[in-house]
Image: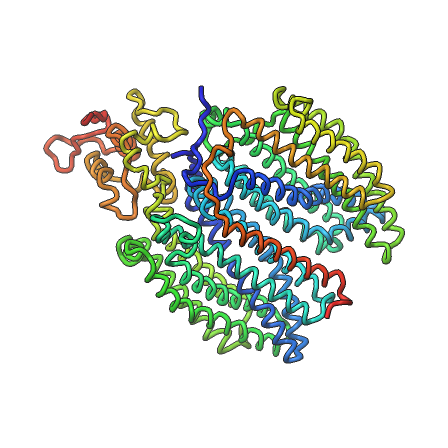
Amino acid sequence: MNYPVWEPPMLGGGLVIGIIAILHVFVSHFAVGGGLFLPITERKAYREKNAALLDYVKSHSKFFVLVVLVFGAVSGVGIWWSIGLVNPEATATLIHVFVWGWAIEWVFFIVEIAAAFIYYYGWDRLDPKTHLMVGWIYFASAWLSLFVINGILAFMLTPGRWIESPSFWTAFFNPSMLPSCVVRTAVSVALAGVYGLVTASTLRDIALRTEVVRYAAKWVLVGTLIIPLAGVWYISTLPPMAREISMGAAPAVTIFAGLSIFFSALVVTFTYFGPYQHPRYFNLTFAFVIAVLALSTTGVTEWVREAVRKPYIIYNYMYANTLRVADLSRVRQQGVLESARFVRHHQVDPLKPLESGREVFRVQCASCHTVDGYNSIRFAVKGWSSDMIEYQLLHLNELKGFMPPFVGTDAERQALRDWLLSLNPQPAPREPGSPGVQAETPAASPGASKP
Amino acid sequence: MNPVIPAPVPIPLPAPAWLVQLLLVFTFILHLVPMNLLVGGAVILSISSYLGRRHTHHRELARRATRAMPPVVAFTITLGVAPLLFLQLLYGQLFYTSSVLMAWSWLAIVLMVMLAYYGIYWFTMQQEELGPRAFWVILLTALLLLYVMKTFVENISLMQQPQDFYARFLAGAVGNYLGSNSPLVFARLTHFFLAALAVAGLGLAILARSWKAEAPELAVWAHRYGLRWFQAGTGLQFLVGLWFLFSLPAEIRGIFLGGDRLATALLVVAVVLAVLAMAAARKSLAASSVAILGTVSLMAVIRHLVRIAYLRPYFDPHTLPVEGQWTVFAIFAVLLVAGIATVGWMLFHFFHPARAV
């Protein structure tokens, strides 16, 4: 409510972040897992004196650099860009709490990038031992980078003791930090295998392809075996409401949580019966199918992780619409238009109540809802009468646990109600006495029932 | 009317404002070096790629010099993260507002940088295969980078003029603002652009020396050619710098013209160092590089003073409450030193492979 609100049409801010974030997660976990895959496979090639395998690792490292250094690094910056645009208040809060954490992560990022280049350009310049060492330095810095970012991300869902005793340490070592870190590390290992399958499937030498395909498949299987175990631990640390939301309270989230398990199971099944059991017949198309399934798993899982945090963006501290829990009663008294800075009018304009209602929507609801696109509000209130909308707004957080309470004056609530009602033109009133006639229309309720 | 500015986050700063400012300016200088090499390098490579259709020297230059570009892009991005982090910590309420007002073009930067990055790789890895089309790849890359540069200049300019926020908000849909395109922005952009050409020219002259063994004739030619870019860029900067200085509002310009002794002295020293860098270029690249690094560093400080002067009526970060997170800061400082040492160790082995054990 502090900042002007950007409303990307159709997508909404949430989906803008989501699209960038899901692609980034898919690549950044590979950046970590791939960093383990490269030196381990390189060492295997040296030990077995397998020159063909070493050539594979070299070509895989080129693919790795092109995917990770460019797409991974830039999309990571892209997440930062998008959260600053969509939710500046929460971004600013995270930066205040964690700036030195981010600065530490930046050091790891620099070492990671430098190591990746030296590893890639160093194949013919460095002796095997030093080259391998550079590979391990890459992996260590990439994993430490994950460790730091994971702590910040976990903080948003489980800030734990930070709420009562705010400090960097209570924020970083929050309840879900450790299990989440194990899950992400396991995901990294699995994704290293998935990307390994993609490059291995293009190898011409059949014997080598069979060997590497089976080897990469093992990475996928090991990673995906750890994920559910660590996942149960992770879920046990979540706030009760987050668990409820994902297990029935919010059907869409439950469906996505189910899909996450379903897609993971498909990845395991396809990998086991495909490249693991029959590596000879594995090809690029099959590799892409597994990669798409893995991307789908990443997508729905990240979506669920974001969804279960509702109604908050920082649990128990800041609502998804950037209202701080501590400011609730002040804004309720003052009014949302009065509290917001970038609005055209600080009071409901009696001449243009619908415009005011739209403005209330923008500052209070647009961080999650669009009018016509993703999570469309027009669709959500379709068929609702004025009374129904009024009732929902009065009890928003009780009726829908994943939504913040409506805050604002009576006049603001009524302006919002009338605007919501105006979104779906009401059917023309039928003859009096016929069933289903709504007595109240927007025009009939100018919004002055209470002072 | 009072300017509409969002309130700062109600959480104390994790370090005193002076320390954050110091880190902001210092890490910005670190970013400026590869950023100049990148933008100027992409332009110089575009020209050489075009001229290389007829001139062998240009063709060879484009082929060899571009190999240095992928790490330059990577470090432009990586080293750009820290100053932006510290900027958001100190001036978040201004920076986010200006960013949100121009959300589309600001977000487009991410895509542009990614395309430019792949453009650099494409040009570097497949120049031979691309043939004459290589020129279009690198030209498009250079244009993308110039777009990024312009958007940065627009955003950082708007950020320090919070008195305009509310009018911009009223003027149109939030996110659609494309920048003021004011003469000040263009003066600033030209100033940055020339600096990029000059620094990249100097970088080319230094790089060319490493070609001596393999292509001695080309090395001598490219060394001179790079220096010409450096001297032309720096020479023109005296004019453009004046243009930039005189397009600043009088009260801000004044601090560099005697109004503030420190600011005036910094500007004078920066200009003198630039003159020395030009004079020394033909004799000693090392001396010239040190001098121009001095100019770039002082200019970064001067730029920060300009920001402070712009914001003086509205916001002073020193008024924010502070609660130092010193333990975490110490860990950061130690890791920074360890990180630099690790990178140094890897670079040492990379450039001295014979001595590697």
Please say whether residue A101 is visible from this viewpoint.
no
Image: A90 above or below A205: above
* Quarter in which the N terminus of chain B is drawn: top left
Q: Where is residue A114 in the image (x, y as percent from the top left)?
A: 64, 57
Looking at the image, residue A22 lies above or below residue B48: below
Above or below, comparing residue B178 to residue B117 in the picture: above
Instruction: Where is residue A118? Give x, y as percent.
Output: 67, 60
- Using the rendered view, name the quadrant where residue A329 is placed: top left
Give the total of numbered labels: 0
When the figure is inspected, residue B80 is found, relative to residue A134, above or below; the finding is above
Q: Which of B192 and B12 is in front in this view?
A: B12
Q: Where is residue A436 in the image (x, y as percent from the top left)?
A: 15, 37
Q: Which residue lies furthest to the right in this view?
A: B217
Q: Can the viewer see residue A201 in this picture?
A: yes
**Residue at the extreme bottom:** A48
Q: Is residue B26 left or right of residue A447?
A: right
Q: Decide which of B154, B5 is in the foreground and name it.
A: B5
Instruction: Residue B103 in the image: state x and y as whole percent.
Output: 50, 37
Name the residue rendered at 57%, 38% in the picture.
B21
The front one of B327 and B28 is B327
The residue closer to the viewer here, A220 or A233, is A233
Q: Quadrant of residue B85?
A: top right
Q: Quadrant of the C terminus of chain B?
A: bottom right
